[in-house]
Amino acid sequence: MHACLEGPTSSLPSEAKGRVEAYVRELLRYNERTNVYSKSAYEHLPFHVQDSVVLAQHLATQQPSGGGVLDLGSGSGLPSVVLACVMPDRPVFAIESKSRKTRFLKQVSRKLELPLYTPLTQNVKACYAYSYPNPDPNHDPDPDPIPNPNPNQRSATPTRSSMCPPSPPRPSSPYPRWGRSPGVAFSGRRRCTSLSPKHRSRSTSSPRIN
């Protein structure tokens, strides 16, 4: 614990240093019952805390005032929580896919009174795909790089669609679109029971699929 407050952490203002100390105490306490930081790596915790403090000090001096921070794969809050402790006036977003860790981050945000710190339970790839759509709705996703003067002749320069192989066909199901089993209908891979009793009475010879 004391090693986390040495080095760069010792040069912080008293309020920021107090928030960092409270975060480390909460991390060690919470980790006793819920694994959010590997106990076998406790010897590396002072380095991670001090390294996060150095990053926060760099951003505070180099990043324009009011700029936010996005931490992808925040884990137990290093460096995102330390950044919020040192820069409480800037928004910090922590993206983490494991809900047990984001629950801890939300608890830390409440206890340390960090209103601009926002933990989000989200997969990084899904978050990226959702956050960066095509900004131009009229943009052609597959343009021909060189205009073809002869419309009846295909351009010699391959386009993206010609370079990518076609998608393989979906495997056909051995069952018809509407199931032969009494009272059962198939739609893709899912099976649902029919709501009409007539379907069960019409096909009594076929065995029921369980």
Image (tube, rainbow, N blue to C red):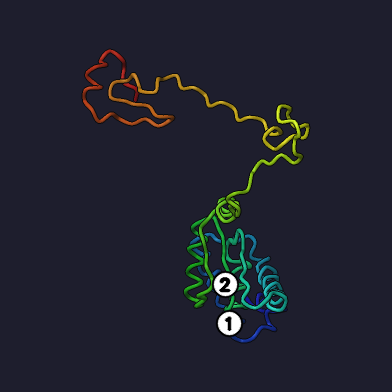
User: How many residues crowd mark 1 within 10 Å: few (<14), some (14–19), many (20+)?
Assistant: some
Quadrant for the N terminus in the image: bottom right
Q: Is residue 209 left or right of residue 11?
A: left
Instruction: Kindly identify which numbered label has been placed on residue 91.
Output: 2
Circle 1: residue type: Gly
Q: Earlier in the sequence, mark 2 or mark 1?
A: 1
Circle 2: residue type: Pro
**The residue tagged with tag 1: helix, strand or loop?**
helix
Is residue 106 positioned above or below 188 on the image?
A: below
Q: Is residue 131 left or right of residue 163?
A: left
Instruction: Kindly identify which numbered label has been placed on residue 121.
Output: none
Q: Position of residue 72 (x, y in %)?
A: 61, 60
Is residue 36 positioned above or below 92 on the image?
A: above
Quarter holding residue 190: top left
Name the residue nearer the viewer: 136 or 44. 136
User: How many residues crowd mark 2 within 10 Å: few (<14), some (14–19), many (20+)?
Assistant: some
Q: Position of residue 58 (x, y in %)?
A: 72, 75
Q: CA distance from mark 2 to mark 1?
A: 19 Å
Q: Position of residue 120 (x, y in %)?
A: 51, 61
Is residue 15 positioned above or below 97 on the image?
A: below
Quarter holding residue 168: top right
Residue found 71% across the figure and 33% down from its top: 163
Residue found 61% across the figure and 73% down from its top: 82
Q: Which residue is mark 1?
A: 18
Which residue is at the far bottom? 14
**The residue tagged with tag 2: helix, strand or loop?**
loop
- Nearer the viewer's eye, disc 2 or disc 1? 2
Is residue 183 positioned above or below 13 on the image?
A: above
